[in-house]
Image (cartoon, grey):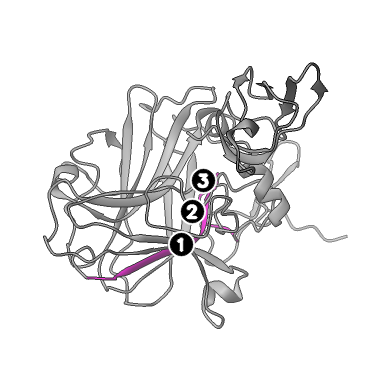
Amino acid sequence: MSEIKVNSIKGVAASSAAITISNTDGTCTANLTNRTNKNLVINGAMQVAQRGTSSTTGGYTVMDRFPVNFTGTDESPTIEQADVASGTTPYTLGFRKSLKITNGNQTSGAGADDYIYTGQKFEAQNIANSGWNYVSSSSNITLSFWVKSSVAQNFYGYIRTHDNPKYNYPFETGSLSADTWTKITKTISGNSNLVIDNDANTGFELVISPFFGTNDTGSGATLNQWGAWDSTERVPDYTTTWYTTNNATFEITGVQLEVSDHATDFEHRSIAQELTLCERYYQTGFFKKYENNSNVTVGSQNFMPEMRAAPTITGEQFESTSDHIWSSIEVTTSRACSFYKNSNEICQRWKCDAEL
């Protein structure tokens, strides 16, 4: 019987082995491209938009887990969940939605304090328990995403830690062709200075930006390497073309962050799976009345799934009279809340926010 003795099997153009075989006991380790739960980004395919599909207000107003933050004298962008055009490469790969930012009408140019960016904050424990040995330079994570801009230029982004001491990793897209979807891939090694706590607070952040003003940029931000966090030098100085172009557009989709030394195929999750992941940070529903005693309504609501932390709760009134608004509400844990009303009726939709 013939034998072939190897210690790994690797593709011609691959950066790492698909199968590694131990020289001592013969055990095999496989690097599976289509493994599940590999994407640390939530809603990377931009499927979930619980708050609405379009807004001109910053923060968490459209896409779940992807706020859009901006400031500027004339900056009034439109943020929307957009359709990916059929026939484009992202569409053929299964992406149907994108996060689209349309620039406002600029009349004052690019101010030093101006910025506009999106991205995602990660719970520290999700990174700490991901399998990435973030203090080792031989252990990697890989970021990949699709981006399209109506203006041809180079754009920047960064990944940073939030636990002290804070560190920052700036990167660039390279010069993009106008109105052309481009896949960006960045492999990032660990660093012995990184600290990521094992808790439910922000420990890690991804930022992708069409523009930062000069108060946030500088030569101290060295591309593709970790450096001490400095909010005045997040990335190198920006070209202002996109920001000073009225109605310029910037779109992203297919955002993936994985423990790997190369980008693998995007992990497409079902809309039900993605929604459940998003609801750890934001969810809505209706209060249920459990007890009616002497014209008093007392009730409670369980959060499914459990939220990241005890949320902030706001409500929408579905009746025309103020008599149908709760008198008090108490959030006891990340799992449930209770409410009280001096009435035998209540008709309220709740919104629970536990975003990072």
Q: Which mark is on residue 65?
A: 3
Which stretch did the figure color magenta? Answer: 246-265
Instruction: Give the answer, above or below, for where 129 lies relative to 292.
Output: below
* Alpha-carbon span between mark 3 and mark 1: 14 Å
Residue 318: x and y, percent? Answer: 64, 44
Helix, strand or loop under label 1: strand
Determine which residue is flagged by label 1. Answer: 80
Location of residue 162 (image quadrant): top left
Residue 151: x and y, percent? Answer: 27, 73
Residue in view at x 16 percent, y 41 percent: 220
Left or right: 193 as drawn, with respect to 152: right
Q: Amino acid at mark 1?
A: Glu
Q: Amino acid at mark 3?
A: Arg
Q: Amino acid at mark 2?
A: Val
Determine which residue is flagged by label 2. Answer: 62
**Image quadrant where one finds the N terminus:** bottom right
Q: Is residue 136 visible?
A: no
Verify CB contact (< 8 Å) between mark 1 and mark 2.
Answer: yes
Q: How many marks?
A: 3
Helix, strand or loop under label 2: loop
Instruction: Give the answer, above or below, for where 9 lies relative to 167.
Output: below
